[in-house]
Amino acid sequence: MQNEKSTTPVSGYTMVAVCLLLLLLGTLGAAVGAKIFGLLIFLPCMLAPGFFFVNPNTSVVLVLFGSYQGTVKTNGFYWVNPFYSKKQISLRARNFDSEKIKVNDKVGNPIQIGVILVWQVRDTFKAAFDVDNYENFVRIQSDSAVRRLAGMYAYDNFEEDSEMTLRSGHDEVNQALEENLKNRLDMAGIHVIEARIGYLAYAPEIASAMLRRQQAAAVVSARFKIVEGAVSMVHMALEQLAQKQIIELDEERKAAMVSNLMVVLCADKDVSPVVNTGTLTP
């Protein structure tokens, strides 16, 4: 496989001076009747197609009758063989914001996902000759990489484990996406500067159900923490009463006290306290 090679053509300003000289000689030859020198007038017209500009962060790929001659990357004004074909390729960094595509995640849930890709051409030979259209190649391969990424991870994880998901593993997931795109786009001479998920959501047909599931999971998790804290507080209260010998409770009264404390501590609304002014004896 051939690789990119840089070349530096003749300065265009030098050839402009040559063309002006040929035009002057041809004009003088025609004036004095020298037909051979008069033909020099037509040479600048034949040389004119060889002039071209290279703008900053732009390259020009030169091809002569199907043979790759090199790439000009230094900006300036140049002249080459008029028979060279010249293809301009931008070296600027470009943003690609993919459309939201509908795919299934690892567990089969339909989701919508989109990617933001920052890329630029590094190897002009590969971009020009190894793929048909490198810009279209970037779009299609980005779509394919996003579909593969979605199949590797679940959108979210409702169980208490450390499995990585699309929603929670931002850095790791984006790194996996970037590595995948680098491998895919390398054959087209494309350098991936950055790749990350730009849009992520459940598909509309299951979004409401998944929202309710997330809310239920959040409520269960919150209740678990509340009960865990309430049990600790009740245990601490019983220990403090026993150590300081403030009051001596039998098992039945302990059970009643635990029940009341748990109701007070775990209730989702403010409780109305009742003051007992009597005795503890039934």
Image (cartoon, rainbow, N blue to C red):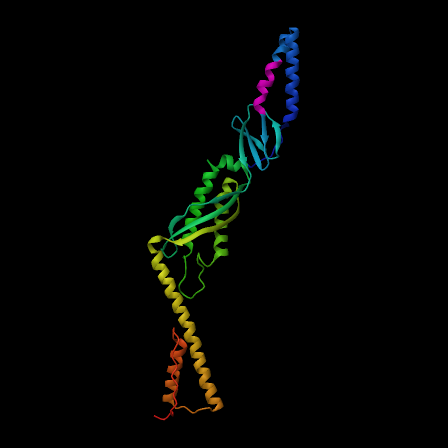
Q: Please say if 72 is above or below 30.
A: below
Q: Please say if 236 is above or below 128.
A: below
Span shown in magenta: 40-50
Lateral position of residue 187 relative to residue 273, left or right: right
The single residue placed furthest to the top in the displayed view is 33
Residue 132 position, x and y percent, is 46, 35
Q: As rendered, which of 14 and 205 lies closer to the eye?
A: 205
Q: As rendered, which of 249 and 70 lies closer to the eye?
A: 249
Residue 177 position, x and y percent, is 47, 51
Lateral position of residue 276 relative to residue 78, left or right: left
Q: Is residue 18 visible?
A: yes
Q: Is residue 1 visible?
A: no
Residue 175 position, x and y percent, is 50, 53
Residue 95 position, x and y percent, is 50, 44
Residue 20: image quadrant is top right
Specify the principal SS of the magenta part: helix
Q: As rendered, which of 120 and 66 lies closer to the eye?
A: 120
Residue at the image point whose x is 45% and y is 42% from the top: 139
Residue at the image point whose x is 49% and y is 43% from the top: 185
Residue 59: image quadrant is top right
Residue at the image point whose x is 39% and y is 68% from the top: 219
Residue 238 is a magenta residue? no
Lateral position of residue 25 relative to residue 242, left or right: right
Screen quadrant of the C terminus: bottom left
Lateral position of residue 76 relative to residue 204, left or right: right
